[in-house]
Image (cartoon, rainbow, N blue to C red):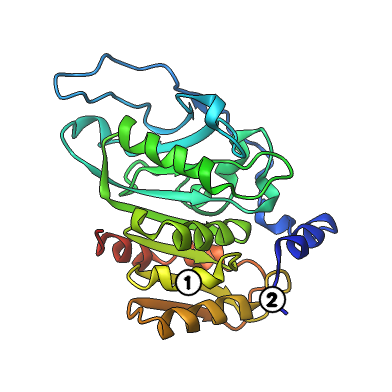
Amino acid sequence: MLATRKTIALLAGIGLFLASCSKDDATEKLTNDNEVLVAPNEAGFVKQAPLWSVKTLSNPGKAGGINPQYLLYTSSTYNTHTSSKWPVIIFLHGIGERGTNINTIRNVGLPRKIGNQTDFMFPVVAPQCKPDTWWDIPSLNTLYDELISKYNVDPSRIYLTGLSMGGYGVWDWAMLYPQRFAAVAPICGGADYIDKVANMKNVPVWTFHNADDPTVGVENTREIVSKLRAAGNTRVKYTENPTGGHDAWTKAYNTAELYSWFKTYRK
């Protein structure tokens, strides 16, 4: 039986979903860099605090189902390449990271993988769901629009990835707004809008799932992949590991080829 939101929430409540947190004992305090570090230069470029910083939506009243705060990662070269338009990855967390403490997002999935690397090749944006909410697509679209207007982002190279509940968010967002993404990488998720899967027939996909996943059954990803291919999408990669339980994201984000695969595609 395919996993639904209700099923996932129930499993989380009894502790099967807590693996997505993977929190360290010591949570680093992040820089709150909502203030401009320097005035924009002549080209309109605004420097950002290096590595991880906490940002706030320009209009917090439009945050809807997401925390007005979000995480932004920029490499050490972001501030020295003031005319560059960067490819960006948006990361959606799992159910264990919902809440109001934005710092917890650094301890899971892609942010955890990046850590304090100074040379990761993409800026990364990581929003947070409010407590007891699901990924809210209109709220995510508000964030998306702000990224393009506020940072040196290449609109033709915006990539989307997420794990578990975030994997659902990736599939749902891409099925409803496929034109927004150059490529997507959903991990151990499912889809609430699978009837709209044909909308993604031109979106490159690399998806990951473990065959023994007890939380979100592997049949969710298998069905979506089958429907995507039947709809004519010839750019679907599917990595299915035989074991690993619900945690398909550690291997996925440690796959170096994933990031070069992202950069292959533009809208």
Q: Please name whichever residue, 175 or 88, is drawn nearer the observer in this view of the structure.
A: 175
Please name the residue shown 47% across and 63% down the image: 175
Where residue 121 is drawn, which disc sits there? Answer: none
Q: Quadrant of residue 194?
A: bottom right
Image position, residue 192 (x, y; %): 61, 64
Vertical comparison of 10 with 204: above or below = above
Please, which residue is most extreme toward the top here? 39
Please name the residue shown 53% across and 60% down the image: 172
Vertical comparison of 90 with 252: above or below = above
Element type at marker 1?
A: helix
79 relative position to 159: left or right: left
Image position, residue 211 (x, y; %): 62, 81
For the N terminus, give its image quadrant. Answer: bottom right
Q: Is residue 116 visible?
A: no
| CB atoms of marks 1 and 2 within 8 Å | no
Please name the residue shown 35% across and 43% down the image: 123
Image position, residue 100 (x, y; %): 67, 33
Image position, residue 229 (x, y; %): 41, 83
Q: Please name whichever residue, 199 or 44, is drawn nearer the observer in this view of the structure.
A: 199
- Distance of label 1 from label 2 (alpha carbons): 16 Å
Q: Earlier in the sequence, mark 1 or mark 2?
A: 2
Residue at the spot of label 1: 197
Q: Quadrant of residue 107?
A: top right
192 relative position to 143: left or right: right
86 relative position to 220: left or right: left
Q: Please name whichever residue, 241 or 231, is drawn nearer the observer in this view of the structure.
A: 231
Where residue 2 is drawn, which disc sits there? Answer: 2
Q: Residues within 10 Å of mark 2 (few under 14, many from 20)?
A: few
Q: Amino acid at mark 2?
A: Leu
Please, which residue is most extreme toward the right here? 14
